[in-house]
Image (cartoon, rainbow, N blue to C red):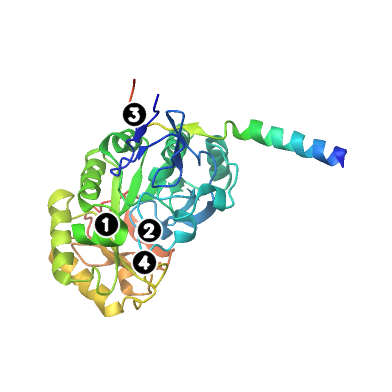
Amino acid sequence: MVKTVQCELCPTECELEDYQVGGCRVRINKGGTLYSLVYGKPCAVAVDPIEKKPFFHFLPGTTAFSIATAGCVLGCKFCQNWQISQANPEDVDFHELPPADVVRQAMFAGCKTITYTYTEPTVFYEYMYDTAQLARQYGVNNAMHSCGYINEKPLRQLAKHLNAADVDLKAFTEDFYSRICGGRLKPVLDSLIVLKQEGVWLELTNLVIPTLNDDLKSVGEMCRWIVKELGPEVPLHFSRFFPYYKLKNLPPTPLETLIDARKAAMNAGLHYVYIGNIRSEAENTSCPKCGRVLVERTGYFVRRNNISNNACRFCGTKIAGVWS
Amino acid sequence: MGFFLLGGFISAFFRRMKSGKREKTAMFWRKTDEA
């Protein structure tokens, strides 16, 4: 009897013969049953400022206990963590850290949130799900930084335990997703809508890569879609690209390009648009009504917070986010 | 030598006990060829 299985976790939906490993490198068919190879085996564990994820409207100034395992559902040519995301689980050092230990260590370190990040948390779904479920019971928040390349059913199930998600919207063309990431745009857009429907606090990150996705027309289109489908209050982070992995031939993103992208986003109607991976005033949160600086940041650190009772301290305008 | 080997096996056994099974059954998949 042939023992073939189909993974239904991400939109790639790998069909796997016996003893074949999925495209994510961390799920294997053994005798007609699909197994995760990375459950409880994070290859990266760290305590980070929540701003590093980046979350700017979710518990600013707090720390996040961050974990990742090997593997990824995509194969982005610009990946900044390719040493672990494009590695087989047996090729990286890992810790033995079952869900209960993750929650215990997060609480011991005084972290208000556990973040599933660095690589793509979808690949360690079972580990993330069990940890998130347990964390909730102990009053610890859960947040993920994801590419959003996940099927609707697992995402809805996970969202019940998620407080926040930062999703990489890498570009707004199918061509970019296909040529540069080895995936598709449509499932990512669908995931964003699901997260919004499920009431998960959502922020978006767009890595601006010279010549590949820095076309202002496309940036404008993306931002108009965000305003229409997700609302103007979803924070968008334009992040500076540095040459990594398979795109070492391109230069870092000029600051002017990021400033232009930010202007296009604000013209499209978005209220909170940030520039990351470079020092600038666009790291601060300003009130969309009175324009005063509400959260002043330097890099990942919060220097001043003028948000009181979820509102601008100066004019009382409600500021979208989870502030306490 | 034998003492160290035995120690290694005992240590590996307890590590395995602590971390549970080496592989966890995945949550979202289906068999494609039930015969």
| Alpha-carbon span between mark 4 and mark 2 | 15 Å
Q: Position of residue B22 (x, y in %)?
A: 57, 35
Q: Quadrant of residue A239?
A: bottom left
Which residue is rendered at x = 53% and y = 54% of the image? A47
Compared with A159, A231 (above or below) is below
At label 4, which amino acid type do we have? Answer: Glu
At label 3, which amino acid type do we have? Answer: Arg
Report if residue A269 is visible in the image.
no
Q: Are marks 4 and 1 in contact (CB under 8 Å)?
A: no
Q: Which mark is residue A54?
A: 2
Q: Position of residue A8 (x, y in %)?
A: 32, 36
Q: Which sits earlier in the primary sequence, circle 2 or circle 1?
A: 2
Nearer to me, A290 or B8: B8
| Alpha-carbon span between mark 2 and mark 1 | 13 Å
Q: Position of residue A71 (x, y in %)?
A: 44, 50
Give the side of residue A243 with respect to residue A211, left or right: right
User: Mark 2 or mark 3, which is nearer to you?
Assistant: 3
Q: Which sits earlier in the primary sequence, circle 4 or circle 1?
A: 1
Q: Are marks 4 and 1 on the same chain?
A: yes
Nearer to me, A97 or A111: A97
Residue topped by disc 1: A169
Residue topped by disc 4: A296
Q: Secondary structure at mark 2?
A: loop
At label 2, which amino acid type do we have? Answer: Pro
Compared with A274, A316 (above or below) is above
Q: Secondary structure at mark 1?
A: loop
User: Mark 4 or mark 1, which is nearer to you?
Assistant: 1
Q: Are marks 2 and 3 in contact (CB under 8 Å)?
A: no
Q: Which sits earlier in the primary sequence, circle 4 or circle 2?
A: 2
Q: Position of residue A29 (x, y in %)?
A: 44, 34
